[in-house]
């Protein structure tokens, strides 16, 4: 006797559904897939949010008076100094000291750019100008291209003989091919 595996779907005939049953089952499967995708996306967002919270701890919001904030600033200065950063006061002082230098440097740069690039006057054209091609010399690339072709032609000797007598070469080739065909037929 044959052993029937309950795990195998190929043992029996395939399941048959009516069109309505297939639509209902398809809709259910699509809904499950949509829910799973949404759940995975939501879990990824949450994990990123938790990771970001671990990396950058946020300060809790407290309603404290202005007097209590001053000691925190001193602690912040010490913490910044321990990290190797400058305090805000030092940064502000340096920024103020640099401002006059930056403004004078900026003015000097503007003067240099104005001197280097004077505005060019546009020439007014009176209309369409006629161009005579015979007066225009050939471009340099044309000369170099012709030189290259001459050198190439000198390197390949057969090309010159074929190009000079192209009709004769064609007759020779076709005649040789036709004579081979006649020999093969015999």
Image (spheres, helix red, strand yellow):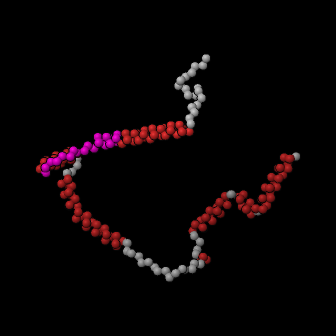
Q: Between residue 143 and residue 68, name the one nearer to us.
A: 68
Q: Which residues are magenta?
A: 46-66
Q: Between residue 172 and residue 12, name the one nearer to us.
A: 12
* Residue 175 drawn at (x, y percent): 82, 55
* Residue 184 drawn at (x, y percent): 84, 46
Residue at 49% from the left image edge and 80% from the top image edge = 125
| Residue 47 sits inside the magenta stretch | yes
* Image position of 101 (left or right of 121): left
Residue at 42% from the left image edge and 78% from the top image edge = 121
Question: In the rendered image, is residue 161 in sight?
Answer: no
| Residue 65 sits inside the magenta stretch | yes
Extreme residue in the bottom direction: 126
**Would you identify the image quadrant in which residue 134 lies?**
bottom right
> Relative to residue 116, is residue 38 depicted above or below?
above
* Image position of 2 (left or right of 179): left
Residue at 60% from the left image edge and 76% from the top image edge = 133
Extreme residue in the top direction: 1
* Image position of 129 (left or right of 173): left
Residue at 13% from the left image edge and 48% from the top image edge = 68
Extreme residue in the left direction: 67
* Residue 80 drawn at (x, y percent): 21, 47
> Relative to residue 131, is residue 53 depicted above or below?
above
Q: Quadrant of the N terminus?
A: top right
* Residue 5 drawn at (x, y percent): 55, 22
Question: In the rendered image, is residue 57 in sight?
Answer: yes
Q: Between residue 99 and residue 154, name the one nearer to us.
A: 99
């Amino acid at each position: 006797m044959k052993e029937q595996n309950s795990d195998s779907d190929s043992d029996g005939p395939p399941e048959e559904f009516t069109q309505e049953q297939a639509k209902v089952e398809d809709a259910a499967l699509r809904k499950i897939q949509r829910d799973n995708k949404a759940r995975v996306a939501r879990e990824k967002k949450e994990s990123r949010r938790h990771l970001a919270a671990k990396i950058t701890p946020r300060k809790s919001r407290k309603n404290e008076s202005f007097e209590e904030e001053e000691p925190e600033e001193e602690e912040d200065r010490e913490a910044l100094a321990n990290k190797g950063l400058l305090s805000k006061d030092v940064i502000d002082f340096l920024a103020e000291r640099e401002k006059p230098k930056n403004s004078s440097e900026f003015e000097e740069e503007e003067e240099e750019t104005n001197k280097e690039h004077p505005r060019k006057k546009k020439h007014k054209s009176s209309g369409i100008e006629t161009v005579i091609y015979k007066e225009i010399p050939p471009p340099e690339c044309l000369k170099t291209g012709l030189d290259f072709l001459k050198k190439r032609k000198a390197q390949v000797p057969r090309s010159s003989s074929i190009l000079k007598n192209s009709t004769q070469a064609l007759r020779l080739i076709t005649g040789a091919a036709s004579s081979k065909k006649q020999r093969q037929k015999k």
